[in-house]
Image: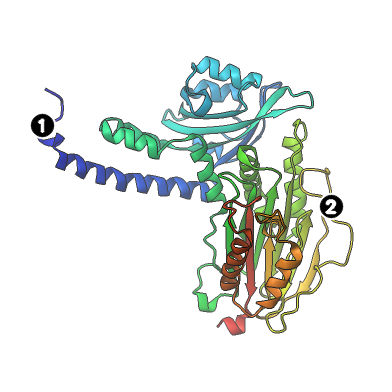
Amino acid sequence: MSKRANSENTPEKLRERIVQLEIELKRVTDNFSAALEQGKAVVYSRNFESDTYEFMGDGIRDLTGYSAQEITPAIFDSISITAEPQGELASVSLDEAYRRNRTGVANRWIADTAIRTKSGEVRYILDMSTLLRDGGGRSYGTLGILLDITDRKRMEQELVRTRDELRQANEEMEFDLETAREIQRTLLAQHYKFFPTGVPAESSSVRFSNVYVPARQLSGDFFYILPVSETVVGVLIGDVMGHGVRASLVSAFVRGLIEEIRPFGNENGRVLSRLNDGLISVLSRSRATSFVTACYLTVDIENKILQYANAGHPEPLFVNMTTGAIPDPFRKKRETEPALGLLEDFPYSVCTRPVSAGDVVYLYTDGVHDVRNVNDELFGKKRFISFVHERYGEQPDALLESLMKEIRLFAGAKKDFNDDLCMVALQFVAREEAR
């Protein structure tokens, strides 16, 4: 007789168990997404030649008990109990999986790894990385992330004991690119609709709206809203060159760097310079050129001032809601400053302008105006700006919705866009009017 009583194996009991597991899985998944959103994914860069971590996020202490200064590849390997490769390496032995990754046969590494922490606790970590190659195509290291998946792993073990539920759970919890997609979605998930945070909508001084449509399952577009202080909030928007796993991992790396620049988030030029230096330090030896266009804008609600720095990104649109005027870009005409990851130690300049109640700033990636229709015609920047100007009186939420309808109508029968499409609208409301 099985260990379970027959009464526990009835269809009714199994259906009840499925419901319970689905509720528990939702809780675990929500916690998983929250961990990503709160910046608990630990970014690292490993060099095979020196067998060192060139970069390791401070969150490694929470995962392993070792600080970023203590942890080494040798220590991480010594505390690893088991590793379960996913995706293209799932069908080979662990030793063969390591060999293929180190020699460059497999460009991606995705594995569930069980570790024993410094205190002796067993935890499960998602280890996901992409190879870095030098100019000759030889692999010399990896760029990746580590994330605690202990709750999810233990839930999988529970599902193993329910046979049919196991198959269902495996389909729902499949890693490979699904994990990467989850990371990408979470990086873009912004819960800040109003600023200052924690105040009701009617008392807010800045209101945010956004729209994001990926061209593929994984993308390189991202945006991040950064509360700098009680009176200053920043918005970073960026576009990683290319698509796919590499682009999403570079986005994740930028996300890790953002947490480290938070203390000086009101220094726009310094923010871009630090992001630039961080990218160059990791990606400069890669065979494939990698860069990120980005702009970082802050609004000081106390002094009613906008500050802005740009790294090769499309200029934002500044719209006066009273007159509908869309002035020239913030700065006077000058050479475009380079994208992040191209020129080391570049000092990004900052432009300042006053802001009035009702003014709206639209930040966007070039996918907004690079949409093409079935005749290969471009939607174009002129059409995009004209659309915004003609509907300047609409609230940002409504305008973005109307713009998406217009773009989809223009694209016609084409189901997918050529590039990712991302927009963030920031509307300033004077404190006196917000109250």
Q: Is residue 272 above or below residue 203?
A: above
Residue at figure coordinates x 57%, y 81% from the top left: 434
Question: Which amino acid lies under the numbered mark 1 shown in the image of this protein?
Answer: Asn
Q: Quadrant of residue 360?
A: bottom right
- Outermost residue, front side: 375
Depth check, front residue: 211 or 264 = 211
Q: Residues within 10 Å of mark 1 (few under 14, many from 20)?
A: few
Q: CA distance from mark 2 to mark 1?
A: 72 Å
**Image quarter hosting the C terminus:** bottom right
Rendering quarter of residue 46: top right
Relative height, residue 15 to residue 52 (above, below): below
Q: Which residue is mark 2?
A: 347
Residue 406 drawn at (x, y percent): 61, 66
Residue in the image at 41% along x and 29% along y? 122
Name the residue rendered at 65%, 18% in the picture.
103
350 or 76: which is nearer to us? Answer: 350
| Mark closer to the observer (2, 1) | 1
Residue with the mark numbered 1: 6
Say left or right for 202 vs 131.
left
The local secondary structure at tag 2 comes to: loop
Would you identify the image quadrant in which residue 267 lies? Answer: bottom right
Q: Earlier in the sequence, mark 2 or mark 1?
A: 1
Give the x, y percent position of residue 393: 64, 80
